[in-house]
Amino acid sequence: MHLKLAKAAARVAAASAVVAASGLGFAQAAMAKPATSGINVPCSADALASAISGNTGGETLSLTKFCVYKLPGALPNITENLTIDGNQTTIERSYASDTSYFSIFYVPDDVSLVLNQVNVRNGDTDDDYGGAIDNADGSVTVNGGTFSDNTSSYAGGAIYNEASLMVSGATFTDNSAPDYGGAIENTDDALVTGSTFTGNSTGGKGGAIYVDGHTAVADSNFTSNSAEHGGGIYAADDGETFAVTGSGFYQNTASGHGGGIDNGDDDMTLTGGGFYQNTAYQGGGIYNYHDMTVDGATFHMNAASDEGGGIYSEYDVALNGDTIQQNSAEWGGGYYNTSHGTVHVTDGQIVSNTATEGGGGIYNDDGYVTLTTTSVINNIPDNCEPVNTISGCTD
């Protein structure tokens, strides 16, 4: 894992109940000056570049409706606080074969960029990070808009963040990075709400999002993203907190661990939402390598070619009111618990899962499992293995 870059000097205040509950804090940075009325920007790349260069701080640029701003070269860096209203417009790096490589937006220290309904397309940087947005140490807020076909040469195909990032109601489609975070890599503070991630990819970790800092994801959907580890999301081994609330993971794939989520070493809290038809070598729905709490989630028809069709875990897990149904694997169709793991299952349903070798419901590999008012039934070829290692589970 690459080194985590220096964090911003202070974290900002809480912005929602989801974030407050997870202990994370975010807020849009205050403008250096009161926002002026919108400045209309004609439909040309030169006009957009001129408007950004002329921004004295706190201005709002209003883009021409339905325009496509085709960039033959990089825009000026965002050196003063700026808001851009998109009006259903697109900013794209030119598709011409001789176009140089650059991030669409570069945000340096102590400035803020707010994008409202701006579509960003075909950013492509050879400077490692963030094809669409490289947030070096500022504050970035994204409200709506679509990020598509952006790529980087290392991490964060669409957005790379090492300070403060808030994303709400945005769509990320077909973005890619070779190593980390097909759509987003976060190394500091990030809140993602009400957003959609489809068809993003990386050859490394985090098909849609790579988590390397305080991160909260709420009410978002992850579909058909892919990676070696963490087809939807990969959480790095940095010991930070990571919360996912009310989100869905559908048909994501990992050639290694965690079709939906690979929790490398974070304290992870998952509330509500579900995992459907995700696939991996281990942990079709989730691969967990640290403490994890899952409340009221559904794991349905996920598959692992080796162990843990629904969940594979090596550490302490609390499952409360979850449904694990019709998942499949070679060992542990519903749940695979290693010798390091302690699992407490309360008010759960582990039903109709399948293992080709053993432990259709749960395979307990010399760990510790407790069941409280939980049904483990109708699993194939058996409910729990090894036999008599889990009190209250009968075959």
Image (tube, grey):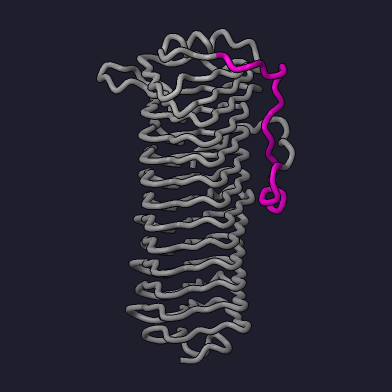
Residue 45 x, y percent position in the rendering? 41, 13
Q: Position of residue 114 (x, y in %)?
A: 58, 27
Q: Position of residue 152 (x, y in %)?
A: 40, 31
Identity of the residue drawn at 53% across and 19% down: 62
Residue placed most toward the observer, 171 or 233: 171
The vertical placement of 131 against 239, above or below, is: above
The answer to which of 110 and 81 lies nearer the viewer is 81
Quarter placement of the C terminus: bottom left
Q: Position of residue 314 (x, y in %)?
A: 53, 66
The answer to whether residue 33 is seen in the rendering is yes
Q: Is residue 162 magenta?
A: no
Q: Is residue 350 above or below residue 86?
A: below
Spot the residue most to the left: 97
Q: Residue at x 39, y 46 (%)?
A: 198
Instruction: Find the magenta span and give its range.
Output: 15-39
Residue 59, image quadrant: top right
Identify the residue at image location x=59%, y=47%: 238
> Is the residue 338 above or below the residue 121 in the image?
below
